[in-house]
Amino acid sequence: MKQVQTKRDWKKLAHDVVEEKMITKEDAIAILEADDTEVLEIMNAAYIIRHHHFGKKVKLNMIINTKSGLCPEDCGYCSQSIISEAPIDKYAWLTQEKIVEGAHEAIRRKAGTYCIVASGRRPTDKEVNHVIGAVKEIRETTDLKICCCLGFLNEDQAGRLAEAGVHRYNHNLNTHANNYESICSTHTYDDRVDTVQKAKQAGISPCSGAIFGMGETIEERAEIGFELQRIDADSIPCNFLVAVKGTPLEGQKELTPIECLKVLAMMRFVNPTKEIRISGGREINLRSVQPIGLFAANSIFVGDYLTTAGQEPTADWGMIEDLGFEIEECAL
């Protein structure tokens, strides 16, 4: 017989967080395990925290995939892995001119952060120089914040990216340490943490999150939130697995919209002052409840993702306006 859980006072828990009383792992698990009928109460409570720290602002981010496919890593979720049979576009590095053009497209889409992403285990020094050249031109002509996601870095590469004006470096933890070997064998969880730390030591704001729905337990899902708190990620992308055909995880059951909302709420409670971004899988997994997600999160990607399509920017702008929220814009 299923044990009947005592209903929580979610608003009180939210006010405790606003008063800088950190929640426990048990509280986080309770959010994830709450009855589905409580999800609107939970999101309303998460909004108390979100509004306290971020008001009605929503940050928009745009990705450019500067190098696609043929990655030597065997991450089971990724269509860009060399073991993937997914029919994606595969190409070498875009020119610096194309990368700079993408920055101006980001501004047209009202994004404040431009994310330069490249597939692969780690960049060569020549590839880092290629990115730096584009970054310098973007910094000279726009007020965009620039995030890079290029794979594993060494100290010298991290330092040079920081010197060039890269604001943020993304390197997701992806899943719980206990679950890592089940999704990837070519590198370790600790390898990923190491790159986040190298970026931070170089003075770059760390961006790190996870892909939820890859076989982690509820307890592990909660612990991911606390691990991101421990490494002090400033920006936390919450991705939801899109089980792409042709990848090893193509048969994995995807999270329901309600499960996704609970994840977003839990992340807001655990990391109250951080940018929580609804990332990959937003349109596919959250579907019609996407707007509700912004009562916990304060950031989204606008436009397409790396290898999957997003909705039109006008749809995102309209969603934000309909909620009574405001876009944090970046001007030329």
Image (cartoon, rainbow, N blue to C red):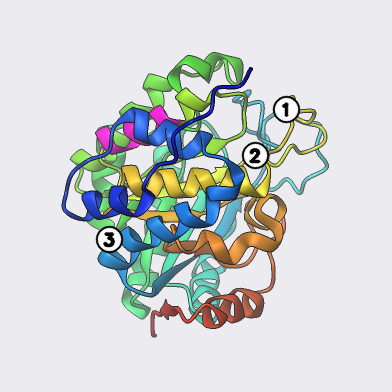
Q: Secondary structure at mark 1?
A: loop
> Mark 3 = which residue?
165
Local crowd size for mark 2, using a 10 Å CA cut-off: few (<14), some (14–19), many (≥20):
many
> Mark 1 = which residue?
249
Cα distance in 3D space between marks 1 and 3: 37 Å
**Given the image, on which type of amino acid does mark 2 rest?**
Leu
> Mark 2 = which residue?
241
Quadrant in which the C terminus appears: bottom left
CB under 8 Å between discs 2 and 1: yes
Whichever of callouts 2 and 1 sits on the residue coming sooner in the sequence is: 2
Residue 216 at x, y percent in the picture? 56, 24
Whichever of callouts 2 and 3 sits on the residue coming sooner in the sequence is: 3
Residue located at (41% from left, 54% from top): 276
Seen in the picture, residue 176 relative to 88 is either above or below; the reply is: above
Quadrant in which the N terminus appears: top right
Seen in the picture, residue 53 relative to 74 is either above or below; the reply is: below
